[in-house]
Each structure stands twice: as structure tokens, then as C-alpha cells.
Image (tube, rainbow, N blue to C red):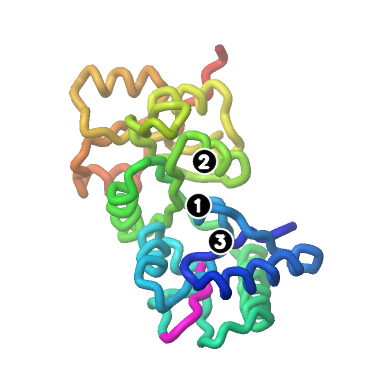
Amino acid sequence: MLHRLHLLGFSAFERSTLASCVRLAGSRQPGYVQVATPEDADFLVVDADNVDAVLTASAGARVSDAVFVGRHAPEGAAAWMPRPLDALLLLRELDAIVALRGAAAADTPALPQALIVDDCEAATRHLAGRLQRLGLPSVAARTSGQALERLARQRFEFVFVDVELGEASELDGLALCRRLRRQPSPGARDAVLVLVSAQHGEVDRVRGALAGADAYLGKPLDDDELSRLVSRPPRAAAPASH
């Protein structure tokens, strides 16, 4: 199994060095492969001296999945190493993280996790922060296509879908809900589907229910409503037979 890595920040020279190291590590165990987006990565390698890179990792609630390289690492980082960049040391740090997580997975059941499908980074960050405070870690997908790719390989307890997903998405939130109910992805088979929208009148909520959503949250989010949903989730609707 290849563990997916995404690089955040770094100079052109450092990125080239890291990319070469990742390519060479593809044939070893554990193996690694570089991917294009943070959402598709199992682990991030972050330039700790690049403010934008650190903020991106924090906004996606991915600090605990990240190895930071530089002067300091945020609290909760998976690992930290100083400069100058040592690619072999980075692989050893990643190997240690993989081994620890493998041992933990063998001893304990997987923690519940949420998928947030929203094309707006600020809205994703806002919801991810609130879910984290409720003890529910999350990952993000910016488009319906990214969401379907994640759901094909990972199980989620909750899927929060914004109704408006922007021009980059093939499906809007309602259509994505219908797709997941009629052709369930492995990761959404038992998930609670939650539509989120600034439009949350009675007609909008009926449309959400007809699309197969288990719950409908209005924007701006109500803390009490979100807390009740996470602590006492409705039973996920059965997939449609037609």
C-alpha cells in the first residue's frame, strides 16, 4: 500500500529534492507517492516557515497528519524536524507515524470522522473548527468529484454537503445527495447525510429530504443545533432502490 503525501510550501529546490525522495520511496515498505491536493493525501509535509502553508494545514484540520519542517511546529503536529532539509530523516519520521498508527488501529476502533463538501474554504474551516470542538475530526472536499473519490476509499459517519458547490463541481449538493442514496459509495453507506445552505426555508428543507438528506442545517450555523445533531444523529436513510 502506498501512503499519499502532499507538499505544502518549500522552495523549488526543496520541492524537487522531496519529490525525488518520494519517487524513490515508492518501491519500499512502507511506500509513498506524491498527490496533487491536501484533500487526497494521507500525510502532509509542510514548510513550517511558510505562513500560508501552515494556515492551509490548520484550516483543513490536518495538523495531526503533518510533518513540519522549519523553526517551529504547531501544537498537535504529527512530527517536526529542523532545517536543513534531510529527505532520509523525513522518511524515517513518516515510517514511525505509519507504524504508530498501524499499531493503534489494531488495538482500538477507528474514530468517527466527517467529510465536509464545500467549495468555500472559509466555510469549510468554520465548520471543521466547530466539529473539532465537538470531538468530531473532519476532512474536506472542494468538489463533488473529490467527495466521491474520498467516499470510494474511506468510511465516514457524517457527510456535510453544501447545496451550492460552484462551477467546478459536476453535481450540486442536492444531486450529490441523490447520487449517494441511489448509488451508495462505500464511505457513505451508513453515513448521516447533512445538507448545509443559507437557503433553509420550508421548501428548501423539503427538497433536501426528497434528495435523501438525513438533516438540513441553515447558515449561519446554530451551535446548539449542530451539537444535537452530532451527539444524537438521526439514523442514516436507507439507499433508494430505484
Distance CA(mark 2)–CA(mark 1)? 8 Å
Question: Looking at the rendering, which quadrant does residue 28 occupy?
Answer: bottom right
Which of the marked residues, 3 or 1, is nearer the chain's N terminus? 3
Between disc 3 and disc 1, the foreground one is 3
Residue 151 sits inside the magenta stretch: no
- Label 1 sits on a secondary structure element that is helix
* Depth check, front residue: 135 or 198: 198
* Depth check, front residue: 80 or 236: 80
Mark 3, residue position? 6
Q: Position of residue 45 (x, y in %)?
A: 54, 69
- Residue at x 40%, y 55% (from the top left corner): 136
Which of the marked residues, 2 or 1, is nearer the chain's N terminus? 1
Q: Position of residue 142 (x, y in %)?
A: 43, 43
| Count of numbered circles on the image | 3
- Residue at x 34%, y 35% (from the top left corner): 162
Q: Where is residue 137 in the image (x, y as percent from the top left)?
A: 42, 57
- Residue at x 52%, y 40% (from the top left corner): 146
Mark 1, residue position? 39
Residue 68 sits inside the magenta stretch: yes
Q: What stretch is highlighted in magenta?
A: 66-71
- Dot 3 surroundings within 10 Å: few (below 14), some, or many (20 or more)? many
Please tell me the numbered disc located at residue 146.
2
